């Protein structure tokens, strides 16, 4: 494989981070739309919120890997 075509770890993490952020925004929109229906299905709403929280945890984990530790 050509060296210029290979992605390094940081590039892969940045791509994964963008995908997770997009999924998080999509879930947020879905939750908002479901809440606007008047009588949302509480079980579905809870599942979507739990999934959104899990995505947020993954986003934070990747952000921590990309940002170097700075000792003050």
Image: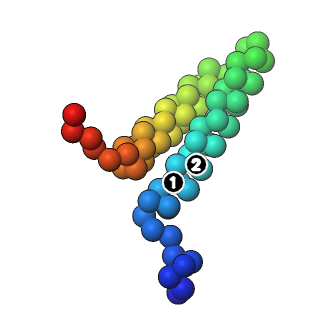
Residue that appears at 51% across and 54% down: 14
Say above or below: 10 vs 69: below
Q: Quick check: marks 2 and 1 in contact, CB under 8 Å?
A: yes
In the image as oriented, which residue stretches furthest toward the left?
71
Say above or below: 1 vs 46: below
Circle 2 sits on which residue?
18
Residue that appears at 62% across and 20% down: 42
Q: Secondary structure at mark 1?
A: helix
Residue that appears at 42% across and 39% down: 60
In the image as oriented, which residue stretches furthest toward the bottom?
1
The residue lying toward the viewer, choosing from 42 and 57, is 57
Number of numbered markers: 2
Disc number placed over residue 58 in the picture, else none: none
Residue that appears at 45% across and 68% down: 8
Quadrant of res 39:
top right
Q: Secondary structure at mark 2?
A: helix
Say above or below: 5 vs 32: below
Coloring scheme of the render? rainbow
Instruction: State left or right for residue 43 relative to residue 68.
Output: right
Circle 1 sits on which residue?
14
Instruction: State left or right for residue 33 relative to residue 65.
Output: right
Q: Residues within 10 Å of mark 2 (few under 14, many from 20)?
A: few
Q: Residues within 10 Å of mark 1 (few under 14, many from 20)?
A: some
Q: CA distance from mark 2 to mark 1?
A: 6 Å
Observer able to see residue 47: no
Where residue 33 appears, as percent x and y from the top left, is 75, 24
- In the rendered image, the quadrant that contains the C terminus is top left
Quadrant of res 58:
top left
The residue lying toward the viewer, choosing from 63 and 3, is 3
């Amino acid at each position: 494989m050509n060296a210029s075509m290979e992605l390094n770890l940081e590039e892969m993490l940045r791509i994964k981070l963008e995908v997770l952020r997009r999924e998080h925004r999509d879930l947020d929109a879905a939750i908002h739309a479901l809440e606007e229906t008047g009588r949302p299905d509480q079980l579905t709403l809870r599942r979507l919120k739990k999934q959104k929280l899990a995505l947020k945890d993954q986003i934070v984990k990747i952000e921590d890997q990309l940002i170097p530790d700075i000792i003050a």
